[in-house]
Amino acid sequence: MVFARTKLMIHDELFKPRPVVRIHFSGAHPEKLYHEIPNLVTKAFKVSEHAMMEKKFSWLKGEPERFKILWEIDKDLDRFSYYWMEIELSGTVSKGSGTGEVVVVSALRTEYPQDTFWERSLFYEFMRMIWHNAFYARKREEWLVEGRRLVSLLVDNIKQITKEI
Amino acid sequence: MPDELVLSEHLLAPEYFKSIVFSGYNPASLLKVIPQLMKDAFRIESPAFYEDVVRWDVSSDPITFYAEWRAIESKDVRTNTVGTIIIQGAQNKKDKIGTVTVWILGRLQTKLPNKNVLDKMLNKTYTWLFYNNVRRTYLDEGKRRINWLDTEIRRLFDIMERGEHYERNP
């Protein structure tokens, strides 16, 4: 991920034209998936827990209990590109059983810094465009294919666990 | 030229905060517990702990409350970790049932002297060659402390705790 105040971002969703994958399930203890999802992500994407941030955690007690958890995952690919993914787990549980939903949104992001005078110059931009189209675009295509494979693997693993619940 | 160069980074990057929403029995108990939790997490004494805002309105039912706390942990002569917790919620007077939202924020702040051209030049070399790795360690430590705070708040309300793969100690 590029650390820059101003940057040009190219955001390509891994799944097109429908970038969102939704898995609905019901069974005993749907909240158990809360512990499973981080394990599945770290294994599938080969990232450490530091690359996975739990952005929001909501737990409403009562009958039924409602929960919603949102994670963001960033996996660096090189200096400019990374996989970005958001996973949301939500559901209800009452007396040990309930329903849940997992939503997966994923994308490949490339960021070019534009902080300095040099990075904003017309010449730099011209050279960057040539380099991007001549060499980098092909690499990004490979990453898009690999990203799709990894997310599909993750979704399959989540489905498998929801069947076991 | 400013006298100081301040490098500030969010501990929870890419997001700058994390939020916990809880609904259940006695959410206002957080007002009592959080100061000590923050002192324990950041290993600081009272002078480095600031209770910036505490608002408590008992004139209506439900009671509403809002509070902000800040803990400053000194890492070395140039760097501090600043942890902030903001809570906002409401609680019924009779049955003590209510809702609270907790926002946890963290920042790593490094201040370097920047009085002249020599300072400016040496700052860049020093941070690039030596200090970046040290700051990276501080970032990891800060993140661990915030995760620990998160776990303790959840334990208090008896809600789902974080998984085994997260670090447990602050």
Image (cartoon, coloured by chain):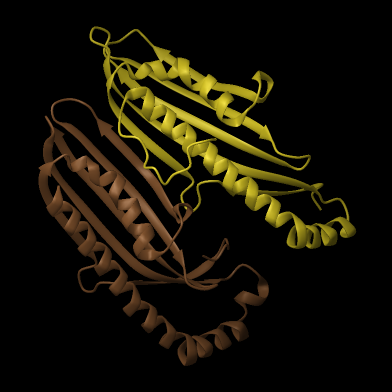
The tally of labels here is: 0
Image location (x, y in percent) of residue B23: 27, 26
Residue located at (39% from left, 78% from top):
A143
In this picture, is A120 found above or below B161? below
Residue A83 occupies which quadrant of the picture?
A: bottom left
In the image, taking residue B104 as reference, residue A14 lies left or right, namely left
In the image, taking residue B131 as reference, residue B88 lies left or right, namely left
Residue located at (46% from left, 29% from top):
B86
Viewer-side residue, A17 vs A84: A84
Image location (x, y in percent) of residue A6: 55, 64
Q: Which chain is brown?
A: A
In this picture, is A93 found above or below B95? below
Residue located at (13% from left, 26% from top):
A63
In this picture, is A87 found above or below B145? below
Image location (x, y in percent) of residue A159: 17, 58
Q: Which chain is yellow?
A: B
In this picture, is A6 found above or below B107? below
Image location (x, y in percent) of residue B68: 50, 26
Viewer-side residue, B147 vs B109: B147
**Picture quarter with the C terminus of chain B:** top right
In the image, taking residue A112 as reference, residue A75 lies left or right, namely left
